[in-house]
Image: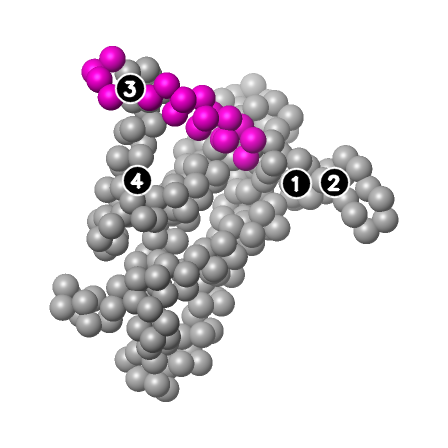
Amino acid sequence: MRLSPDEIIFWQSGFFKLNATIVYTWLLMLVLVLAARCITARLSHGLARSRWQNMLEILVGELLVQISEVGLAAPRRYLDFLGSLFLFVATSTLSSSLPGFEPPTASLSTTTALALCVLIAVPMFGIREQGWGGYLKTYLEPTALMLPFNLISEVSRTLALAVRLFGNMMSGAMILAILLAITPLLFPVLMTALGLLTGLVQAYIFFILATVYIAAASTPPTATASTV
């Protein structure tokens, strides 16, 4: 039983390895880019719209609502980044039902890379909204004594993002493999459906947590206090 797609090596030359995580990550990104290109190539502004356009508009509208409800006043500014995170994790989960496909999110290296993207995006959005002074001041809230704890919090929540997604994806795949070995005719469909549902929930949790972190960095503390 494999714990990670990193263990599947397609090509190796010395230190350099081409494993399943890299191959399936780039394949997934290629599929997402081509799908976005095909769906948006013939967008209609009238009532006659394709099924794919309707589905995409529903998804984008729901993501905008979720971003807005977290507290970001201009959700379209964050849609590109947060929507891409959600689509990548969700598509990775759904693609795991394909025979022979190994979801990249079952690798700790992939989930760490996604969490690092959030770690970099949070100060970028925070500085854009509040400026350097306003953003750096958030590390001194509520008092300057909290500076080291706020810095530790930045690192620990990034680690938590990576480990949470990796643990849930890996454990789901392991449980499914064990049940398939024990009862190959009874559980496959049920557990596959449950695994896909769990994966989609994890994609939503990852998306919401990233949105909350960005909202906390982009909103002045005084504004947050007044809304409470």
Magenta region: which residues?
29-48
Q: Secondary structure at mark 3?
A: loop
Sequence-earlier tag: 1 or 4: 1
Q: Nearer the viewer, mark 3 or mark 4?
A: 3
Q: What amino acid is found at the position of numbered circle 1 in the picture?
A: Ile
Q: What amino acid is found at the position of numbered circle 4 in the picture?
A: Leu
**Mark 1 surroundings: few (<14), some (14-19) or many (≥20) residues within 10 A:** some
Name the residue that disc number 4 marks. Answer: 63
Sequence-earlier tag: 2 or 3: 2
- Measured in 3D between alpha carbons, the distance from the residue under mark 1 to the one under mark 4, in whole angstroms, is 28 Å
* Image position, residue 41 (x, y; %): 40, 22
User: Per the image, is 37 magenta?
Assistant: yes
**Mark 2 surroundings: few (<14), some (14-19) or many (≥20) residues within 10 A:** some
Q: Residue at x 55, y 42 (%)?
A: 105
Name the residue that disc number 2 marks. Answer: 18
Sequence-earlier tag: 4 or 2: 2
- Residue 22 is marked as 1
- Measured in 3D between alpha carbons, the distance from the residue under mark 1 to the one under mark 3, in whole angstroms, is 36 Å
Give the overall secondary structure of the magenta segment: helix
Q: Secondary structure at mark 2?
A: strand
Q: Residue at x 46, y 73 (%)?
A: 152
